[in-house]
Every structure is written in C-alpha cells, then in structure tokens.
Amino acid sequence: MKILLDHCVDRRLQRFLPAHEVRTAFEMGWAALKNGALLDQAQTEFAVLLTVDQNIQFQQNLQGRSIAIVVLVAVNNRLTTLAPLIPKVEALLPSVQPGEIHTVS
C-alpha cells in the first residue's frame, strides 16, 4: 500500500512499515502544503495519509476523496512513542477505505 507520512510524523517511521511504499511529504516536494492542498496532491498517488494531527478530522471533509487518513494518537510525535502503534496500523490497513478517517492509539 502507498502511504504518505504527514509533515508532523518522524520520517524514520518509514522503516517500521517495510511491506508498504512509504514516502514523506518532504520527499514528495510537498513540505509547504497545508492539509487541504496536501490531501489534494496526496490522493493522486497515495492510498493513506498517516498523521498525528488529531484536528484533521474536524478540518477536512474526506467525502469523495480517494485517500484515507490514519491518525496516530499519542502524547508526542517522537519515534519511540509512535513506533509501538505500528502493529495496530498494520492490522488496520487492509480494511481502510478511501474517504475514511481512523484513529490508532
């Protein structure tokens, strides 16, 4: 599955998802894009946006979008805090559908 890591997610999290094609917003040249514009670009190439932005579900309407969002709910965005959530993300990914927002904590 093609996954985009949002600006706020440690890029080193990529190595915890080896079965997927994972890129960062920075790698894609989208570092300056905000949520709506980032989703516009991301949905052309990715199935999932992985973020720690818990407000995104209130700021963005995903209806009609061809991308899903997975929000990592944690006390901070450090790699050591987020890495333990990856098994739950892996278990969730096969059932994720475009236009959905899921939280993992």
Image: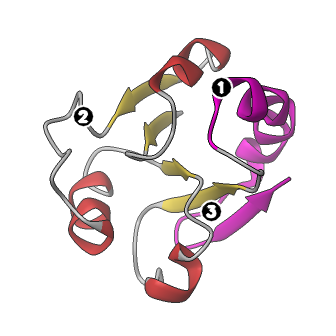
Q: Secondary structure at mark 2?
A: loop
**For residue 13: magenta?**
no
Q: Which residues are magenta?
A: 77-105
Q: Amino acid at mark 2?
A: Phe
Left or right placement of residue 54 versus residue 6 in this view? right
- Label 2 with label 3: CB-CB less than 8 Å: no
User: Residue at point 35% right, 32% down?
Assistant: 24
Q: Give the vertical position of 81 relative to 68 (above or below).
A: above
Sort mark 3 into few (<14), some (14-19) or many (20+) by Cα contacts within 10 Å: some
Q: Amino acid at mark 3?
A: Gln
Mark 3, residue position: 97
Mark 2, residue position: 26
Mark 1, residue position: 79
Q: Quadrant of residue 82?
A: top right
> Would residue 61 be seen by someone viewing this image from the given angle?
no
Q: Secondary structure at mark 3?
A: loop
